[in-house]
Each structure stands twice: as C-alpha cells, then as structure tokens.
Amino acid sequence: DQQVKQNSPSLSVQEGRISILNCDYTNSMFDYFLWYKKYPAEGPTFLISISSIKDKNEDGRFTVFLNKSAKHLSLHIVPSQPGDSAVYFCAASAFGTGTASKLTFGTGTRLQVTL
Amino acid sequence: DSGVTQTPKHLITATGQRVTLRCSPRSGDLSVYWYQQSLDQGLQFLIQYYNGEERAKGNILERFSAQQFPDLHSELNLSSLELGDSALYFCASSAHETSGEQFFGPGTRLTVL
C-alpha cells in the first residue's frame, strides 16, 4: 500500500527552466510534508517542508505547494541548475496522530538538469 | 555532511548470517531512526529510538532488532539473513522525539549472497 506516490520516476529539464516534481498521497491523516534530495552514495538531505495549515512554502529557488483537497503536493525549482540533478523524495508524516516520527517516503523522482 | 555517521559503508555476507550496523547521531540529537531502501523503492521506516527507548516501529521484521545505547549511538542487528534483505540501510537523527526534519547518514549497503 503506497501511501505516498511519485508517479514520475524521472524528469529532464533544461538549465534555467522550472523543474516541477509531483507527489500524491492517500492518507488523510498526513499533516506534514517534506522534500528530500539525494545524491548517489549519500544519504537524503532535507530540502524544504510544509505543514498542512499552509498551502505554500518558499525557500530561495525552492517552493513547495500543497493542495489538501487533491492530496497533492509539488516542488518547484526555479531556475534549475545542473547541481540540482539528483533523486528527489517526497515524504509525509502525521503529527496529529502521535506518529510524527515515522516518515513515509515516495519512491523518488530522478531529476536531470541539462545544459 | 549531515553529522550522522554510519559504519560500515559496505557489507557483504551470506544467507543465514547475522550482521550489525552502527549509527552515531548528530551531536545533541536524541532520536535515531532506521530506514531500509530496497532496489527502486522508497525508504521504508523500520524503527525509532529516543534517548534509549523504543518509540515507534514500522515494518521491521522479527529477525531484525535495534537498540540505542547510553552514549546515544544505535545498532541495527539483522539475523538469519535472506537474499531479500540486500538493501541500503539508512540511519537518521533528530533533536526531538517527534520531528519531521530528520538528518540522514550516508547509509550502509548490505549485500546478501
């Protein structure tokens, strides 16, 4: 039962353009969402998060949008840079249920930013 | 560098054997989490310890066990290993008992032959 889904295994974007990575979830108890970035041979690195009380959170070139009614979130990277090439994981947790410590991850989207 | 260290980086062993993976959290972090990433899968939460006590359990097999020691480092013990246990095992840490933002180590790649 995949509660967090990233339906695009890969995405290729030109340098300078916008990268949009999508994530869908099925568990309505999820109330906190995160994006992690992972380079080969390294552990995931926290990128940005959003609480369910917000619909947008911005940090520099990275913006996360949350649509609770659609159970959908997206990560926008503008402008995309070659160093952004990595695997991006969407993750979710449920603070309200007392199980906040458990992050449920999607399967990841491999982003390639081309010159 | 997240500040979380894991040893060893790679481990190759045979079916039926037992291995121990070690994790040292970031300085000051009290929570340690273990995750398993199999091929083409997302990270699966296994277990969490907070200040030495088990706090949350995920899809951890009975053949697997973990503990957190007084110095806050943690060990994940995998026994009666099967081919399907081959995976990347990540440790993460956070300052508090419940924290969405977790800091991950580089992982241990386990290969069971």
Image: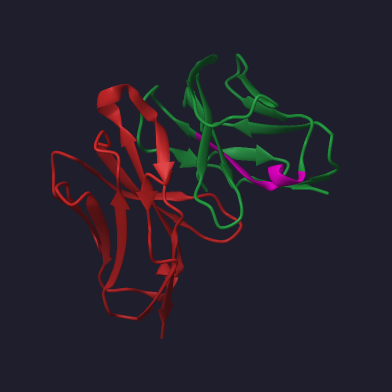
Chain colours: A red, B green
In the picture, residue A85 is in which quadrant? bottom left
Instruction: Say above or below: A15 vs A26.
Output: below
**Quadrant location of the N terminus of chain A?**
top left
| Above or below, B53 relative to B42 | above
Question: Vertically, is A86 above or below B64?
Answer: below
User: Residue at image x 41%, y 27%?
Assistant: B95
- The dominant secondary structure in magenta is strand
Image side of residue B106 versus residue A86, left or right: right
Q: Position of residue A34 (x, y in %)?
A: 33, 46
How far across and down, in percent of the image, does residue A49 sit? 28, 46
Residue at (46% x, 40% y) in the render: B103
Q: Position of residue A51 (x, y in %)?
A: 21, 40
Residues rendered magenta in the picture: B83-92
- Say whether residue A60 is left or right of residue B76: left
Check the image and name the residue furthest to the bottom.
Answer: A115
Q: Is residue B86 magenta?
A: yes
Residue B112 as seen in the image, left or right of residue B9: right
Magenta highlight on residue A90: no
